[in-house]
Amino acid sequence: MIDIKPIFSRYSNKLLNQKYIITIDINDQNLFLLENFKIIKKYKISSSMYGEGNDEGSNKTPLGAHYIREFIGKDVEIFTIFKNRIPTNQKANILPKKEKSEQDIITTRILWLDGLEEGFNKGENFDSYKRYIYIHGTNEEKLIGQKASHGCIRMTNSDIINLCSINLLNTFVYIST
């Protein structure tokens, strides 16, 4: 894992949550939750099947410094499907095999990321927030641990609930390869 302290220090004056940090390692498909710079949780994730990149419309996972701008779904039931960030009355069926569904279904919780690096993941045609880049649950849980998303960071539904059990609003998130 990279040394996050010098990177975090560049942006810490912009963030309200100074206690927690999330780092995402694309190569290993892992998300680490740090408290006071010490790893307290590790989760398997799925990043984009199209690779890494910040361009709008690329369906790639953006790299670099972000923060959690919005948290959606605090009290919704596990497996609830979101449409346009609004919980529906529908529940996702978790696919029993390592297979892709025809839709990119967003479930259970949404942590909406906003870029911190102007000209890289914030602004014009590469803005993570305007690209709707989230950390969220999925119905394709068997694909967690490999690149399978359409740009977002996917987690199992129980893991995203576990991660969201603490207040992560305005938490620094760093995505790297």
Image: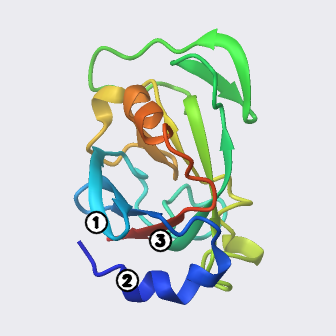
Q: Is residue 17 left or right of residue 119?
A: left
Nearest the viewer among 158 and 50 is: 158
Give the position of the N terminus as an image quadrant.
bottom left
Q: Is residue 162 above or below residue 133?
A: above
* Residue 173 place in picture, x, y as percent: 49, 65
Q: Residue at x 43, y 27 (%)?
A: 157
Instruction: Report how far apart the C-alphas of labels 3 and 1 lie in the structure.
Output: 22 Å
Instruction: Report how far apart the C-alphas of labels 1 and 2 lie in the structure.
Output: 11 Å
Residue annotated with mark 1: 38
Identity, as a three-letter code, of the amino acid under mark 2: Lys
Badge 1 crowding class, 10 Å Cα cut-off, few under 14, some 14 to 19, many 20 or more, is few
Q: Residue at x 60, y 54 (%)?
A: 133
Q: Nearer the viewer, mark 3 or mark 1?
A: 1
Task: First in sequence, mark 2 or 3: give its number.
Answer: 2
Badge 3 crowding class, 10 Å Cα cut-off, few under 14, some 14 to 19, many 20 or more, is many
Q: Secondary structure at mark 2?
A: helix
* Residue 150 place in picture, x, y as percent: 51, 47
Identity, as a three-letter code, of the amino acid under mark 3: Leu
Instruction: Report how far apart the C-alphas of labels 2 and 3 lie in the structure.
Output: 17 Å
- Cβ–Cβ under 8 Å for marks 3 and 1: no
Determine which of the numbered discs, if any, sits on residue 63 in the image: 3
Q: Is residue 93 left or right of residue 112?
A: left
* Residue 108 place in picture, x, y as percent: 55, 27
Residue annotated with mark 2: 5
Identity, as a three-letter code, of the amino acid under mark 1: Lys
Q: Is residue 50 left or right of residue 66?
A: left
* Residue 85 place in picture, x, y as percent: 73, 35
Give the position of the C terminus as an image quadrant.
bottom left
- Cβ–Cβ under 8 Å for marks 2 and 3: no
